[in-house]
Amino acid sequence: SSAFVVALEASRPVTREEFSHAIWHGDGRSRWFDKPCQFVVCDNARAGFSGEHSMMDGTPTLRLVQYVIESSPLPVGSANVRNCAFEQLHFRTPPGLVAAAKTAERLFIEGTEKQHLAVLNYSAYGKEEIKRLGCSPDAFIQLALQLAYTRLYGGARPTYESSMTRKFLHGRTETCRSVTRDSVAWCRAMMSLSSNNEERISLFQTALATHTRLVREAVEGQGVDRHLLGLRMVLRPEETKPEIFEDPAYAYSSHWYLSTSQVSSENFTSYGWSEVTPKGYGVAYNIRKECLIIHIACMRNEHALNSDHLAQYLETALNDVRNMLLKA
């Protein structure tokens, strides 16, 4: 019945990747993953938050964490620490429960060891520079990601970006589909030796405007994915599915090779989640004033994805987009 759990993590993470793993899942022994809100404190006093996504989204979670940080009675580095009284709880563990716990431990280790993540701390510029260049920061990052993925894999694939619909009663999210004809045209121009900088900037601005419009439409409830989801959910078992749901193009277009979203805060050094398909990446980005922090996750499997490779391509793409605009 508790509102949240405080997890005391035994590890002492140093790198961004170590810290991300520690907050994300740790060794599993100090967590209660069914609890929506978990505040995690590591042995070296680094701390973070783990949320269970089915009942909450990034924006309200961000507000919660920001509130906790701003309401802390102790300044950073304070020696005024209270001694809290703890009492060990003793549990009766029958053999069946012990066996179930061992099975869970094995599955947990198998699952977490498959995760490959990279945290790109891009310090060349951040939100302020992107705005000085006359761009929407979110659309800018999305197009740079499309360029990175296209260069790495030779083409664009279905990409999900979460857009908030909290202005509506019980609203949560709608999908912004980041791959458009305009984004593809710009990526092709960036990879073509015959395209000049003026052409590339023109195509980029068109793609930027298209993406911004799609995000605005999604926020206003004018996207397509949640409406189609509602149609599927109201179908009775005996009813025939509309043809669109049997169309291979629809199935492919809803297979998210890139699942993306942003939660931006000057207080976060990392934030992210896993991929939503074994063939894809989970890409979370934090647009700070003077830097960009991008968390990339994928599975180690037969599809040979590599978060480090995508991070490197994304860093190059971010450099190239800025250089393109500065040459205008």
Image (cartoon, helix red, strand yellow):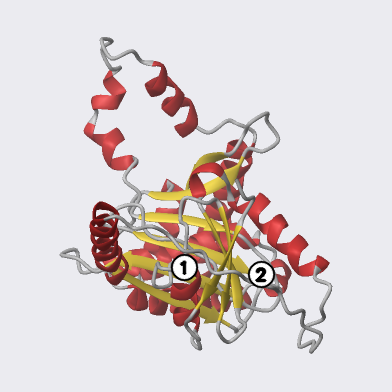
- The picture quadrant where one finds residue 50 is bottom right
Left or right: residue 166 compared with residue 282:
right
Question: Where residue 195 sits: x, y (%)?
Answer: 41, 68
The residue labelled by disc 2 is: 130
Is label 1 in contact with label 2 (beta carbons under 8 Å)? no
Query: Alpha carbon of mark 1 to alpha carbon of mark 2: how far?
Result: 41 Å
The residue positioned 52% from the left and 53% from the top of the image is 207
In this view of the protein, which residue sits in the foreground, 13 or 204? Answer: 13
Quadrant into which the N terminus falls: top right
Dot 1, crowdedness within 10 Å: few (<14), some or many (≥20)? some
Question: Where residue 87 sits: x, y (%)?
Answer: 59, 69
Q: Amino acid at mark 1?
A: Ser
User: Does residue 83 appear in this view?
Assistant: yes
Left or right: residue 284 compared with residue 168:
left
Above-or-below relation of 149 to 33: below
Q: Amino acid at mark 2?
A: Ile
Left or right: residue 215 compared with residue 91:
right
Q: Secondary structure at mark 2?
A: helix
1 vs 2, front mark: 1
The residue positioned 30% from the left and 34% from the top of the image is 250
Quadrant into which the C terminus falls: bottom right
Question: Where residue 170 sits: x, y (%)?
Answer: 63, 31
In this view of the protein, which residue sits in the foreground, 323 or 193? Answer: 323
The residue positioned 33% from the left and 69% from the top of the image is 151
The residue labelled by disc 1 is: 30
Q: Secondary structure at mark 1?
A: loop
The residue positioned 42% from the left and 47% from the top of the image is 181
User: Does residue 193 appear in this view?
Assistant: no
In this view of the protein, which residue sits in the foreground, 324 or 94? Answer: 94
Which comes sooner in the sequence, label 1 or label 2?
A: 1
Q: How many marks?
A: 2
